[in-house]
Image: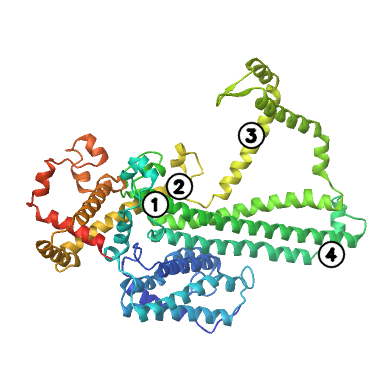
Amino acid sequence: PCDPVADDKIFHIVILLLSVSVALPVNFLDQTQDKSLVLAVFGLVFSKLAVSVIAPDPLPFYKDTPPHLKEYLKIVSIFYYPLLYCPLLVCSTLQRRTGYLLGTVLSFSHGSVLLWQKIDCPKTPELYKFYALLASLPQLLCLFFICMRFVLLFVKGPEHDQDLDSSYYTEYVKELLKKKEQTQAQYVCLKVLFMFKSLSQTVFRFPLKLAIGAFVSFVCIYHTSLLLIILVVPTLHIVRSGIDENMFYLMMGFGIVLSEDRQETVNILVYYTWLLEVCYLCAMTLSIVVSLLMLMKSMIQHRSNLRSLYRGDVCQIYSKHKALEPSRGGVVCWMGLVGYQAALYSLGMVLQTVVFFICFLFLVFLVIVPVFYGRNLLVFQEAAQTWSAWVTLILVTILQHVTAKFMFVKKEAGTTDINNRDSLFLLTYLLFLVNSVIGLLVAMWRILISAVYNLIHMGRTDLSLLHRSSQDYDPAYRFYTQFLAVEVSQTHPVMKAFCGILLDLMMEGGRAAHKIQQVEEGLQENRPNAAVLSRRVRRRWQLVYTLVNNPSLLGSRKHFQTQASEANPANAANGTPTTKTGSRRSQAGSRKDKKESELELAVEVKIEES
């Protein structure tokens, strides 16, 4: 084995001491954080762990690890590497130049040491000589991307405001309440006025956890495909290079004769092993393509599900109506969804590769090769012996379709009805046994289709592999739905925008407070015209309507949590507050509650700000 010049032990001791001192609980998974840095760190940690689990030395502090300690050190490495790279997340969250400078130094140190080691020792003894080099490519890319990103942030400064200070939520509400041009369909259907408006693709942002899950799944697909190729393809090369004339005598002992000529037998075996490799690589390629396609479709479905929950369409995701609020199980699912999704994609790729490989073997060795060489036509010989049964089934199926179209279905005056009922009943009785055989084939086809469908969608947590009435028994989908409940209840853009307005109003000298004072002074001099008042009333009504009637926001409302038992059950069910109502004119002229008027004005100011 090669020993690189850069010693891991000393470097990791120094970095570990720094990591322990800097590892602070910070808000690095917030919706408004810089996604690229967080994605790169999570991908780096997962890639490092995928390599260390297979490496002979799981931790850099030990060389030539004894076998009885290796499993324990692997468990320790699961906690060690996240702690090692935690300072990178802390530096990205602080949004200060000192943090960006420290992050640049740390990422550059990690990347330089790793690159130095791979240049010194590109070949390693485990699995395949270039496995460690190929497996470290995601680490190198993530580290140098983090380094360049920190340098850019250090030069330009932070580009995003954090949490409630972010403009994302106000832009979301502005787009939500923007007046749309009415079309003819909107005039016909008046209920469109009460529906929550969909958002354009430019305003919506993916939650950070879902983005992390997609990126980690992509890294997992790379590592899984690399392992599947390295474990099989080099072995096939060794087997093919070891085929000689002794294989002829070995096969003769088992009664297998491919050819009377020994050299021709060797050539046939070499050719068959080459076909095995081609079939495996085709299966591996198809599995990678399917996994990537499912990952992209999953991201599209995430967007659709989140937008449905944002507008209160809970029943589209859940089989029954429920309040979206945090729970013990929901928080556990929120923490573990990224790891679950990566594991599902990894296991799904393995199963897909095995099944696709078997399918390619049957196609090549039972169909293509026999047809090409004109021998060993086992499938065609079996089909020739049972051709009468297959022809009978095909003719009976065609007969039923033809008679159904021309004899048993009639169309009169734009309606469809059944005709010749006596003949229909007789034909149903006569074809009962034949349809039983067809039903057996349909059952086998149904099993095959279900297996292939579930196998292809194995990695998707946003799609239940069970029926809608039984989807709660699908653990992956249950984890996903509970994750969405926590995510939507905590990061709903309308709720965040409203909380940001309240916070800005309560802060002394806030932007909204100054704007309110300026507007109130201007109102004394110039009274707003009718168009401004109309727009203001409309936007206030839309925002209040959304806050009151959106089912996704019920769990965040104080009266729903504290006064549900005292309120009317009918009102508590839909979240309508139970307050005493007076005439509209008296409510408009009342100036007793100054905070409510300031709050309404703050909402209008925040929405109209550019």
Mark 3 vs mark 4: which is more N-terminal? 4
Q: Earlier in the sequence, mark 2 or mark 1?
A: 1
**Of the pair 57 and 545, the residue shown nearer to us:** 545
Residue at position x 44%, y 62% in the image: 212
Q: Earlier in the sequence, mark 1 or mark 3?
A: 1
Q: Which residue is mark 3?
A: 443
What count of labels does the image hold? 4
The reply to whether residue 14 is in sight is no
Dot 2 falls on a residue whose secondary structure is helix
Mark 2 Cα-neighbour bin, 10 Å: few <14, some 14–19, many ≥20: many
Find the distance from the CA under tag 1 to the CA under tag 3.
37 Å
Which numbered mark, 1 or 3, is in the foreground of this view? 1
Q: Please give left or right for residue 34 compared with residue 452 in the image.
A: left
Residue 286 falls left or right of residue 573 = right
What's the amino acid at mark 4?
Answer: Asp
The residue under the point 39% across, 60% down is 205
Residue 101 in the image: state x and y as whole percent: 36, 81
Earlier in the chain: of badge 4 and badge 1, it is 4
> What x and y, as percent, mark residue 109?
44, 81
Mark 4 or 1: in front is 1
Name the residue tied to disc 1: 306
Residue ID for mark 4: 244
Residue under label 2, please give it: 477
- Secondary-structure class at tag 3: helix
CA–CA distance in space, label 2 to label 1: 15 Å
Disc 4 from disc 2: Cα separation: 52 Å
Q: Secondary structure at mark 4?
A: loop
Q: Amino acid at mark 2?
A: Tyr
